[in-house]
């Protein structure tokens, strides 16, 4: 029996089969590369969609090629096709997305109505001019959404391919199944690449769309006295407060991106904005001093800000606001010794994010707390 298998393996028929498979795989590789290149070159954008046509077209081509390779009945041939797909996605498709994001996101808000009309003829040809600000913003946002959507396509592709291979080759042994799983794991590197592209794009947005706005918004806190009398407190609460202006500015920024970013990208954008606002808020607090009523106002402002973010997002803001909330709580203490009601408490719901040194620095912002009393605290 072993001798017969060896004869078949070394026969001209077996060699012809091998040659035919090799020729087919070269043709399949050429078809895949050329078709994906054409999908990118013919990229178009429907104003009602958040992603462009290249995503759907590319993954349709990839799946078609992989499914066609199943008809060979050769696991090696199927794996070669999957590996080619991974290479095309990483070296061609992902690099196109990355190159579009590297052109940057111009500062300012995005007017999609103006940009969509000219995007069709320019984005795929790389003819974005320096003055095409709206077009550049649109190209950036679409590339970022394309990367996010592509991650879902990769996951779906992996699931579908695995099921189809199991149907086409139901008698895979342990070694063959291990080889197939190892081959499919190459798609995870595509997902990692796409995650990196999204992270890069979000950081670009942070640099141009978030940070330049957040700093002046939050720095306005320094323009207001935090040593208040009862009358000044009443007047402050009756008028337009710092936190109301901050929330209004954040709402304007978030609303301009909510409908144009994919849900996942918008979630990332909101988290970055929240992180920048809370970190900047903490910095300006340490540049200020407070009396009892000023601390009361700060505590209300932090709670209002956290409440707005909670209502505007689908994720918990507790971790993002942990330090800021604790700082506001400490500054709002009525008496210095009340710190012991919080610090050292065995309440499992409270994990202090401030070190003892930081805690003393926060207490020192209250001008009515004496420095020697703060230093005597047993923290």
Image (cartoon, grey):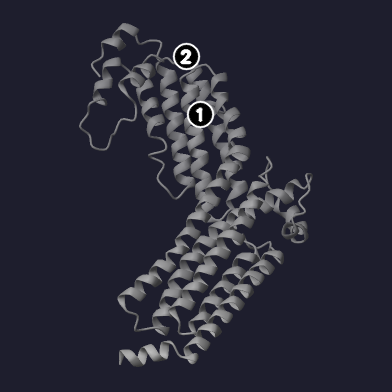
Marks 2 and 1 in Cβ contact (< 8 Å): no
Q: Nearer the viewer, residue 74 or 336?
A: 74
The x, y position of residue 24, in whole percent, is 57, 81
Closest to the camera, between mark 2 and mark 1, is 1
Q: Residue 47 is drawn in which quadrant? A: bottom right
Q: Residue 322 is drawn in which quadrant? A: top left
Residue that protrudes farthest toward the left in the picture = 346
Is disc 1 surrounded by few (<14), some (14 to 19) or many (20+) residues within 10 Å? Answer: some
Rendered view: 332 above or below 30: above
Q: Can the viewer see residue 313?
A: yes
Residue of label 2: 227
The x, y position of residue 174, in whole percent, is 30, 75
Is disc 2 surrounded by few (<14), some (14 to 19) or many (20+) residues within 10 Å? Answer: some
Tell me the quadrant of the picture where the C terminus can be found: top left
How far is the residue under mark 2 from the one under mark 1? 21 Å
Tell me the quadrant of the picture where the N terminus can be found: bottom left
The x, y position of residue 336, in whole percent, is 30, 15
Q: Residue at point 50% right, 68% down? A: 83
Which tag, 2 or 1, sits closer to the chain's start?
2
Q: Which element is circle 1 on? A: helix
Q: Can the viewer see residue 260?
A: no
Tag of residue 145: none
| Left or right, 158 with reference to 51 | left
Residue of label 1: 280
Q: Residue at point 55% right, 51% down? A: 197
Q: Residue at point 42% right, 64% down? A: 185
Q: Nearer the viewer, residue 151 or 50?
A: 151
The x, y position of residue 157, in whole percent, is 48, 70
């Amino acid at each position: 029996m072993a001798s017969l298998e060896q004869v078949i393996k070394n026969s001209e028929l077996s060699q012809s089969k091998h040659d035919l498979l090799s020729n087919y795989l070269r043709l399949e590789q050429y078809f895949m590369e050329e078709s994906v290149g054409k999908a990118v070159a013919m990229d178009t954008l429907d104003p009602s969609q958040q992603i462009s046509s290249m995503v759907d077209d590319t993954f349709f081509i990839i799946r078609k090629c992989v499914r066609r390779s199943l008809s060979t009945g050769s696991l090696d041939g199927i794996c070669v096709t999957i590996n080619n797909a991974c290479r095309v996605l990483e070296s061609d498709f992902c690099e196109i997305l990355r190159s579009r994001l590297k052109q940057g996101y111009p500062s300012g808000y995005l007017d999609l109505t103006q940009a969509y009309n000219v995007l069709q003829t320019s984005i795929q040809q790389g003819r974005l001019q320096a003055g095409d600000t709206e077009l550049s913003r649109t190209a950036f946002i679409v590339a970022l959404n394309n990367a996010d959507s592509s991650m879902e396509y990769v996951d779906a592709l992996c699931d579908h391919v695995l099921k189809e291979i199991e149907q086409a080759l139901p008698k895979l042994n342990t070694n063959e199944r291990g080889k197939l799983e190892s081959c499919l794991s190459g798609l995870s590197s595509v997902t990692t690449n796409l995650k990196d592209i999204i992270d890069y794009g979000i950081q670009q947005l942070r640099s141009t769309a978030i940070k330049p706005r957040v700093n002046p918004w939050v720095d306005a806190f320094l323009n207001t006295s935090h040593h208040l009398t009862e009358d000044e407190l009443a007047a402050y609460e009756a008028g337009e407060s710092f936190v109301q202006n901050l929330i209004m500015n954040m709402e304007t920024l978030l609303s301009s991106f909510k409908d144009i970013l994919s849900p996942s990208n918008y979630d990332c954008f909101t988290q970055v904005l929240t992180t920048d606002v809370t970190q900047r808020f903490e910095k300006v607090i340490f540049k200020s001093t407070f009396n009892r009523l000023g601390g009361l106002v700060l505590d209300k402002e932090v709670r209002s800000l956290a409440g707005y973010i909670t209502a505007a997002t689908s994720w918990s803001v507790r971790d993002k606001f942990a330090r800021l909330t604790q700082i506001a709580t400490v500054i709002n203490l009525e008496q210095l010794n009340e710190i012991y009601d919080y610090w050292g408490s065995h309440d499992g719901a409270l994990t202090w994010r401030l070190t003892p040194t930081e805690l003393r620095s926060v207490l020192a912002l209250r001008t009515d707390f004496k420095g020697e009393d703060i230093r005597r605290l047993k923290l």
